[in-house]
Image (cartoon, rainbow, N blue to C red):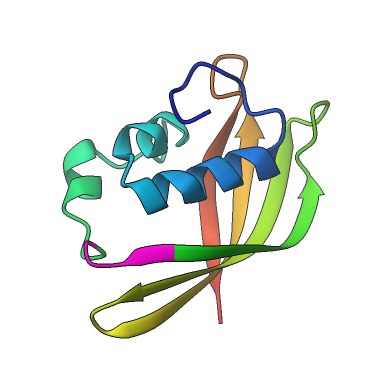
């Protein structure tokens, strides 16, 4: 999936591949799987202040729609990272939409939760 040669069958599958891309530093996959209307530039992704974070764990909390027959979906997750400042916990409720071309689903945006 990270190489961009397959469609993500569900919003959750794309969320998991994006987490893997964050762990690997694969900004090309992150940009490719971002909705074109919301996508940051490559320079913005490269200049992220999260450079020392090592993403370690992803836990899916909730999935609403986002299946093969759906046009939209929501995936709520908690991701854990470690960096020079210690442990980081990111809790987000992300919106996805399905597109015809690869990657099949794209990340639209997310709401950070407490």
Q: Quadrant of the C terminus?
A: bottom right
Q: Position of residue 16 (x, y in %)?
A: 59, 47
What's drawn in magenta, residue-wise? 51-55
Q: Is residue 58 above or below residue 87?
A: above
Q: Position of residue 107 (x, y in %)?
A: 53, 41
Residue 75 vs residue 19, the one in the foreground: 19
Secondary structure mostly seen in the magenta stretch = loop
Please tell me which residue is depicted at 39% across the width and 51% down the height of the picture: 22
Please tell me which residue is depicted at 56% across the width and 14% down the height of the picture: 101
Q: Position of residue 27 (x, y in %)?
A: 31, 40
Residue 57 vs residue 79, the one in the foreground: 57
Residue 35 falls within the magenta-colored stretch: no
Left or right: residue 112 compared with residue 75: left
Q: Quadrant of residue 69?
A: top right
Q: Is residue 81 above or below residue 106?
A: below
Please tell me which residue is depicted at 40% across the width and 53% down the height of the picture: 23
Q: Quadrant of residue 12?
A: top right
Q: Position of residue 5 (x, y in %)?
A: 50, 16
Left or right: residue 53 compared with residue 15: left
Q: Is residue 51 above or below residue 85?
A: above
């Amino acid at each position: 999936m990270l190489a961009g040669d397959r469609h993500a069958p569900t919003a959750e599958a794309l969320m998991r591949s994006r987490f893997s891309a964050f762990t690997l530093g694969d900004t090309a996959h992150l940009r490719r799987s971002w909705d074109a209307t919301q996508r940051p530039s490559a320079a913005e992704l490269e200049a992220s202040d999260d450079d020392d974070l090592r993403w370690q764990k992803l836990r899916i909390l909730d999935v609403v729609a986002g299946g093969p027959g759906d046009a939209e979906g929501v995936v709520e997750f908690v991701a854990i990272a470690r960096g020079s400042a210690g442990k980081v916990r990111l809790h987000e409720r992300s919106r996805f939409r399905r597109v015809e071309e690869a990657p099949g689903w794209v990340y639209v945006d997310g709401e950070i939760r407490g």
